[in-house]
Image: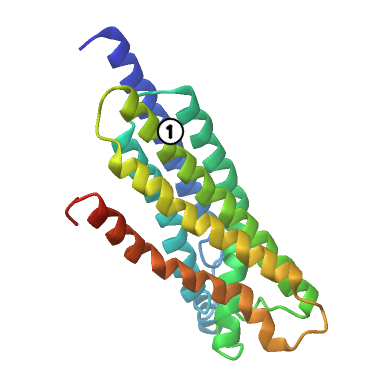
Amino acid sequence: MSVTVHREGLEAGRLDIFVDGAFAFTLTLLAIGGAEIPHDVDKMVHILGDVPAAAACFAQMARFWHGHVQWRTHCTRATRPGLFLSMLLVFFALIVVYPLHMVYASLFNVLSAGHLSSDFGLHNAAEAKALFAIYGFTYFCMSGTLALLFRHAAQVASTHGEDDFVPRMRAVLWLIPAGVGALSAIVALSLPDHAPGWTFALPGLVYTLLMSMGWISRRMRARAGRPE
């Protein structure tokens, strides 16, 4: 192993440790109850009402983190674009964590008629618009950064004569949630404050378009003659 390859391996490993630690920190921000320790059963039951929202947030952040893990399998070399985009992903992760929790807290609060995540609720149309717009924009930033990371991985693979199909495919797939997040933000900002209450569910329903990712992935693999 050459000195250059060894150094790049160390740099890549240190970057991954930093990114992993940053995502772990964002997950601690989602911990139910925070630093507050319940001193009676009623308080404990109240805090446990945040569990569904916390679980949904955990799954979403884990998905973004796993996207970075997958990127590293296709870009094992330490590169400046990879470093910059990874740092950008961490920056956006620290921003998205709060609107992410607020979106899911409000969702479970509505679905449970106020029994779950009872400390949080949307009070008017302006708040709903702002929340979905901020979340959609941060979702766009996170997904778009991962799309750029995989695009960079494909470029590195192509430069070194390696197979670049999978990173190219994943770059396209991450563009879907990026577009969905942007569309959701646009829909939210387009709704007038006096619109019927049910219309403010539309920005959230836009995220059902993410279900197309599996079908698009299968189509891309089939066209390229690649196995599932």
Most distant residue in the bottom direction: 113
Left or right relative to 99: residue 54:
left
Q: Where is residue 81 shown, x and y percent of the image? A: 49, 27
Question: Which quadrant is the C terminus positioned in?
Answer: bottom left
Considering depth in this image, is 180 or 107 the residue closer to the camera? 180
Q: Give the percent coordinates (x, y) of residue 209.
A: 48, 70
Give coordinates of residue 116: x percent, y percent: 55, 83
* Model colouring: rainbow
- For the N terminus, the quadrant is top left
Which residue carries the number 1 mark? Answer: 152
Question: What type is the residue that disc 1 sits on?
Answer: His
- Report if residue 35 is visible in the image: no
**Residue furthest left in the image:** 227
Secondary structure state at the residue bearing disc 1 = helix
| One can see residue 45 in this view | yes
Q: In which quarter of the view is residue 33 placed?
A: bottom right
What residue appears at the point 58 percent right and 61 percent down from the top-left corner?
181
Determine the image quadrant of residue 106. Answer: bottom right
Report whether 199 appears left or right of 20: right
Q: Residue furthest right?
A: 194
Residue 6 or 153: which is nearer the viewer? Answer: 153
Percent x, y of residue 213: 38, 62
- 45 relative to 182, above or below: below
Compared with 44, 70 (above or below) is above
Q: Residue at x 58, y 49 (%)?
A: 141
Of 202 and 84, nearer the camera is 202
Looking at this rendering, what residue extends furthest in the top direction? Answer: 3
